[in-house]
Amino acid sequence: MQVDRLRDQVYRLILEDLKSGEFKPGSRLVEGHLAKRYSVSRTPVREALFQLSREGKLSTAERGYEVATDDDQTTIDRHEVRELLDPRLAYLAASGSQASKRELSQILKQEQAAHETNNVDAFIEANLEFRETLRSMCRNSLLARCSALLDDQAQPTRRRMFSAPHYRELEFEHDQAIAQAIIAGDAEGAEQAMRAYILMVKSHLETIF
């Protein structure tokens, strides 16, 4: 039981470092180095790395693992899956609690402030929190897990895209439209707004890949 808790703890720590950009795409992750970094033994590190590899966030490399890098086809494939999942996610989120809807509104303000101050890291953090809140509102745990997995895998591409101010502006505008429909309890409107967002992302991806 103790080993399981340590594995989960190390898993979360590595995942947070991946999300923050501490570990760059293509960089090697070695058990011994990570064990020292997180002050644990190699066993929970090994198990956490294996789990992250199974989820597509890491790839195997000689004497360890590497942070996964996206090729064009992987990015396109992942987006096709999001086309299927995200509209339903938004539809279900419209039935979320009023407290969750207020939280969504506050996160949107944080996203706007980060964009206006050109703070890319804060914008990414707010955007991830926005999507995590949508998942918590949808009340479908399997759908939420699939969505979270895709988001985690997309970290390198997300940072690359959000570094462009004009794309952040588009992202905020679409997030705002999605949030407005959800807050109003308009499930069909939320679904349509998410579909419009997906089309925007697809169009942008076609210009960079």
Image (tube, rainbow, N blue to C red):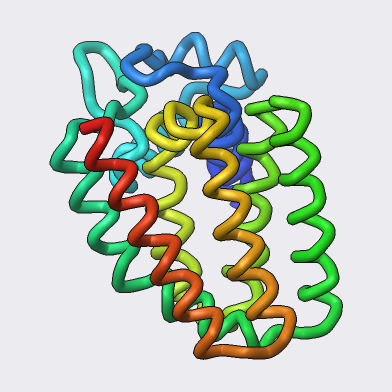
Does residue 106 appear left or right of residue 18 in this picture? Answer: right
Q: Residue furthest left?
A: 73
Looking at this view, is 101 or 27 the one in front? 101
Q: Residue at x 19, y 31 (%)?
A: 71
Q: Quadrant of residue 185?
A: bottom right
Q: Quadrant of residue 208?
A: top left
Q: Position of residue 49 (x, y in %)?
A: 40, 33
Quadrant in which the C terminus appears: top left
As drawn, 49 above or below 142:
above
Does residue 51 appear left or right of residue 181 in this picture? Answer: left
Q: Position of residue 18 (x, y in %)?
A: 51, 29
As drawn, 31 above or below 152:
above
Q: Residue at x 37, y 20 (%)?
A: 25
Q: Residue at x 37, y 72 (%)?
A: 85
Can residue 22 be spotted in the picture? yes
Does residue 10 appear left or right of residue 159 in this picture? Answer: right
Looking at this view, is 189 or 15 the one in front? 189
Does residue 183 appear left or right of residue 94 in this picture? Answer: right
Looking at this view, is 18 or 131 the one in front? 131
Q: Quadrant of residue 88?
A: bottom left
Q: Position of residue 191 (x, y in %)?
A: 47, 80
Q: Position of residue 116 (x, y in %)?
A: 75, 34
As drawn, 143 above or below 39:
below
As drawn, 205 above or below 120:
below
Can residue 44 be spotted in the picture? no
Question: How many numbered marks have been drawn onto this rendered protein structure?
Answer: 0
Q: Residue at x 29, y 49 (%)?
A: 203
